[in-house]
Image (tube, helix red, strand yellow):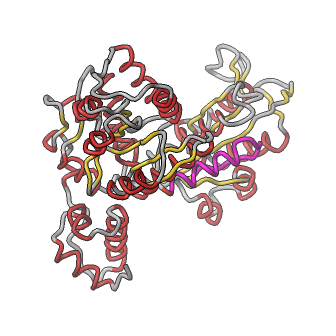
Amino acid sequence: MTKILIIEDDTSFAQMLQKFLARNSYDVVLSHTGLDGEKQLKEHDFQLVITDLRLPDYDGIKLVSNLKGEIPVIVMTGYAEVSTAVKAMKMGAYDYISKPFTPDQMLLVIDGALNSKPVVSREPVYSKEKVEGAKEATTSQELILTSEATQKLEEHIVLVAPTDMSVLIIGESGTGKEVTAKAIHQKSTRNEKPYIALDCGAIPKELAASEFFGHIKGSFTGAVADKVGSFEAANGGTLFLDEVGNLSYENQIQLLRALQERKIKRIGSNSEIQVDVRILSATNEDLKAAVEKGTFREDLYHRLNEFSLQIPALKNRHGDLSVLASHFLSKFNEKLNKQIVDFSAEVWDIFNAYHWPGNIRELQNVIQRAVLLSTTDKVEAKVLPSELMSPVLETVELGSLSKADFEKEQIVNALKRTNYNKSKAAKLLQVTRKTLYNRINYYDLDL
């Protein structure tokens, strides 16, 4: 079995990559520091090394130079630093791969490395077609997201997708609820059948029945032609009901009847149409609270919620921010015909310190704006919206319970992001190290 050494300081990302390669019949050893990587190389025979270029205690270029082409080396960089990757290849690396990358991309590079002869001082050859192809692959396929929250979500999607269970997707605005619904459909046995999305929050209650079930010409004022409703259009496939909590009580009754009977009638028609539709729904409201208030039917809630998925907010997806930011940078470089290679160190600090109330949608919009406004090869802080510059830790009165809880949450999150390095956490929170220690002591945080 081919033995591969991975040197990567991001523990969760390394473990995820290890599991993926193990499923593809590779024997993988992990090192989280460059020094340990050197030790492993002395103690074991490896056929391939995959290393991050940026390690806290080590230089990936140095490792490539030391190996002198004896073992193929693939270098990874999360910063799209082509010039550094080129330098690594000149020193003898087989190839480089920029994060975020897809599993198929990594397998392709590994296959090439294992089937090539050892190389020394190889000049890399780049073609526009190869670069554009890599961009397309990165934007059209799944990203490798490493946070614990995202991994748990992915596991649940894989489990529920092949079933016909109705799934209620819960999450804040901008977290990617429809992306999750599409992923469930794509991984289901209905993936070759229609996927229809309906925004319940944008439908006037008078027209909801027509949108659900369709109508025949002349059935009401404005019905100038026959219309196929969403249930009929999604027959055999998946119907996604976004913001389902916004439906009126009357519309909830109509929806419940259709789900119970699996039959519909177009408005103005007496003919019943049998439908086989899987229902996925989404909400950013607390439907349990709505049920208790009497504004949402309990029987409909249970019909929609045979299985629930909680989409984590971006601020709780530690490790995903850099991957998503790099992905959007690549996407908007192509869209806006720019060649920006990275974000400045200051911008990365701002991104990590910000609480992202608009979640992934806000991150995407911020990066699109920044790419448009940037005139250099790096995104600088001056092109970011002003709201990102506000410190994460507000000036608060510690006697206020709700604000105190918020502050504690921000401190704990910052420490987790930095592996409990208090100096780095203080930088993320935009406070002094002394202030951070005082807050930790004040809240008696057991860290």
Query: From which residue to which does the magenta span run?
Result: 149-169
Tell me if 78 is positioned left or right of 115 in this view. left
The answer to whether residue 397 shows anywhere in this view is yes
Residue at image x 53%, y 31%?
Answer: 104
The answer to whether residue 369 shows anywhere in this view is no
Residue at image x 29%, y 30%?
Answer: 89
Q: Is residue 143 above or below residue 233?
A: below
Q: Is residue 296 above or below residue 402?
A: above
Q: Quadrant of the N terminus?
A: top right
The picture places residue 50, in percent across and down from the top left corner, at 41, 42
Residue at image x 14%, y 30%?
Answer: 376
Residue 167 on the magenta segment? yes
Between 344 and 207, the one lying in front of the other is 344
Tell me if 274 is positioned left or right of 35 in this view. right
Residue at image x 41%, y 24%?
Answer: 134
Q: Is residue 420 above or below residue 217?
A: below
Residue 96 falls in which quadrant of the image?
top left
Q: Quadrant of the C terminus?
A: bottom left
